[in-house]
Amino acid sequence: MASYLLMISGYFAAKHIKKDPENSGRWFLKNALKMIWQFLLFSVIIFAFYRLGNLLFHTDDLTLTINKDRIFRLLVLNEPLFSGVLWYLLAYAYCLLIYAAASHFKKGYRLLALVSPLLLLLYYILGRYSVLFFGESLPYYWSRNFLITAIPMFTLGFVMPELNIKWLTNQNILILSIISVLLLFAECMAFYTSLPIGRNNFIFNMPLSFLIVYYATHQPKITVPKDNLLAVIGKKYSLYIYGFQGLAVTLCSRLVMSIVHLDKETGAFVMAFYHISKPICVFLMALLMAFIYVKIANILKKTDFPRPAPDKENPRFLQSKQGVFFAYLFCAAFFSAISSWRSFQSFSALGAQASA
């Protein structure tokens, strides 16, 4: 899904920049900082949820290891410390920062468009097809980062408003889409039957993504009412649904397993139903979490927190309600992590004494 999201993001970025090219760098920087903020906020909230679950239910859903290698993979390769789906937010933010820098050069956008095919080639070589080039499947973070994932796909969407492929009619798009689906299916079967499982970046997923986005952005007859339910969900909750999807999977699985432990007969039926309808169940759970999050955020915006008086020494971030809320969450998660580490050390010491 990253290819669709990044192409769509690139398309709308290009449309916005065309209206106000002089402030393009500021626009890219503003949205990059927004994505970094969302990444940090989601990380703290998800960590707090998992930590609370570990304490209440004595589970081990969250294993947090911090070392030089993990920090490098976080800052350079966009691999989150936990909740892997958050990689997209950080990779997208880095991509926007690079476009912000490119906006200050006369041929900055053109240079990114020229190097994108090479980056896209590396996306396949280091990803799914690494088993052919290196004899083994490379770690996923080498092909899932800002450099060889976000930049080429965002760039493809960024140049899409300028594309006018006359022979790409609606009928040809339909035919090519069907061919892409069949080839994608064959590609999946070839890898799953004869080669080790690697990453999910298949070659024929890209043309399919391009055809869908091109049709959606170049078809003037497509109109969606503003009060359409899916349009409202997409506009208001899509980012939060994406951010909470990993947590939603865990909650749904825990709920199903709880029912199984309470009643085996009912649990067997619920388990079978969940396997069939898992995408829908996870989406509804993530939507519920997104709805609650937005409601809480709106309440916090209307609530007066004790804040420092505005002055030059206090950053504007700390004077905002969101900043105070984030500070509270961060402190709670930090002290929770410290208590977890101390508990782990205590148990380790007891284990060592028992062994002695």
Image (tube, rainbow, N blue to C red):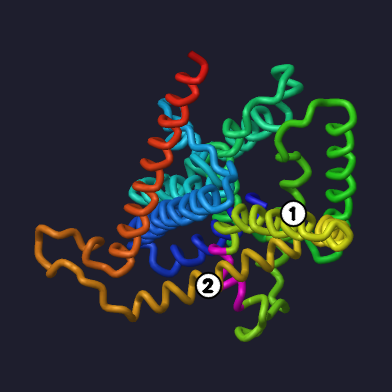
Residues rendered magenta in the picture: 232-240
Q: Is residue 205 left or right of residue 33?
A: right
Q: Is residue 130 shown above or below 13? A: above
> Is residue 55 magenta-colored?
no
Query: Viewer-proximal residue, 280 or 138?
Result: 280
Disc 2 crowd, CA 10 A, few/some/many (<14, 14-19, 20+): few
**Is residue 238 shown in magenta?**
yes
* Contact flag, marks 2 and 1 (Cβ < 8 Å): no
Please name the amino acid that badge 2 sits on.
Answer: Ile
Category of crowding for the residue at label 1, using alpha-carbon neighbours closer than 10 angstroms: few (below 14), some (14–19), many (at least 20) = some
Q: Residue at x 12, y 69 (%)?
A: 309
Q: CA distance from mark 2 to mark 1?
A: 24 Å
Main SS of the magenta part reads: helix
Provide residue 167's location: percent of width, then percent of height. Answer: 79, 59
Name the disc covering residue 292, or none: 2
The part of the image, by quadrant, that contains residue 197 is top right
Residue type, mark 1 in image = Met
Residue located beneath label 1 in the image: 257
**346, above or below 255, in the image:** above
Q: Which image quadrant is residue 149 in?
A: top right
* Left or right for 296, reference 4: left
Q: Residue at coordinates 70% horizontally, 18% vertically from top-left?
A: 134
